[in-house]
Amino acid sequence: MTWGTQNSQQDADEQIEFALSSGVNFIDTAEMYAVPPSPETYGKTETIIGDWLSRNSHRRSEFILASKIAGNGLPWIRNGADITGEAVIRSVDGSLKRLQTDYIDLYQLHWPNRTSPHFSKHHVGTVKFSEVDAAQHSNQMLEILQALDSCIKAGKIRHFGLSDDTTWGINEYLRLSEKYGLPRPVSIQNEFSLLHTKDWPYLIENCIHADVAYLPWSPLGGGVLSGKYIDGARPAGSRWSKTQRNGLFRDSDMANDAVKRFVAVAGKYQLTPSQLALAWCAQVDGVTSTIIGATGMAQLKEDIEAFEVTLPDDALSDLDVVLRQYPMPF
């Protein structure tokens, strides 16, 4: 998602080639990217991936390609309107054109039409669930499913998934898909990291028993778990040095203290802080595939190496001590 702002086509080409050669077989993007989102950067990441694909079409089968339709709230995307059936069909066609491919393996709803408890909205009382018109949203979900079904039948997408959604969202889509014979969600992408464990245990248990893949995004907490932002540091060119759509909501005193503790644990076991955080995330029961992002090749190599690490029980115990002290640091 940094491709198009912090990264060039040349950077992306190098990263894709290295990732595929290292066994990575999942590339995730979205129509909204690059980030921070803006009218000028809309669709740029898909376009960069499409440029690579146009020169490497014979390698399309080597990986699962995932993209997403943006939810409401961005005025330059469908005037900020809700996701509808018509919007799904138009957005799929737009993504296919930018990606220069005939099909998308996994097409995801970037966030639901209703306000969901993500992006630091998980604190008690932030979202008023009782004020949501469940029937209205269920009807919208059915219309979305019907549009996704038409895209699957046309061969434009193969599967669909959710993102930034909840147990109710998962189960309502499952209920509607079973009732009306429509596609079922195969995955959900939610934020999950050492600093943000709210989906454990209930949503992840739901995913396991409903056979819905759980795909953590931001397993490094927007980069903060690397340790590079400790005590207000802002390295030049880093994501936190740029204006963020939702602000730096992960930048709290408690998060800063927790990261210092996690960095100390990493040093104890001779790992980089990023490798510790990624290895922990990958070992959580129910995690299917951990989505990483890197702006540079050194970061990408460091992150990929993390998935060769098996944390010993002592390391997991040390991390648990910190997790219990900082259960919700932002």
Image (spheres, rainbow, N blue to C red):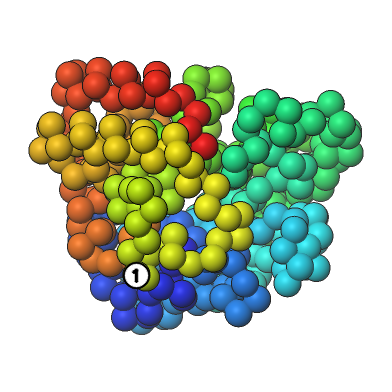
Image position of 105 with respect to 174: above or below: below
In the rendered image, residue 182, in percent from the top left (x then y), is placed at: 71, 40
Q: Secondary structure at mark 1?
A: loop
Number of numbered markers: 1
Q: Residues within 10 Å of mark 1 (few under 14, many from 20)?
A: few
Q: Residue at x 29, y 47 (%)?
A: 227
- On the rendered structure, is 33 left or right of 60? right
Give the x, y percent position of residue 120: 59, 40
Of residue 249 and residue 135, the one placed in the foreground of this image is 249
Mark 1 residue type? Ala
> At 65% from the left edge and 70% from the top edge, which residue is drawn?
93
The quadrant in which residue 294 appears is: bottom left
Image side of residue 139 versus residue 315, left or right: right
**What residue do we see at 34% from left, 44% from top?**
225
> Where is 50 relative to 177, above or below?
below
- Left or right: where 50 falls relative to 265: right
Q: Which residue is at 26% across, 59% downward?
A: 300
Q: Is residue 62 visible?
A: yes
Q: What residue does disc 1 label? A: 236
On the question of residue 170 being in view, the answer is: no
Image x and y of residue 54, in percent: 41, 80
Q: Position of residue 159 (x, y in %)?
A: 56, 48
Residue 291's place in the image compared with 309, above or below, is below
Examine the image and state in which quarter residue 75 appears. bottom right
Q: Along the line of sight, which residue is nearer the eye, 166 or 269?
A: 269
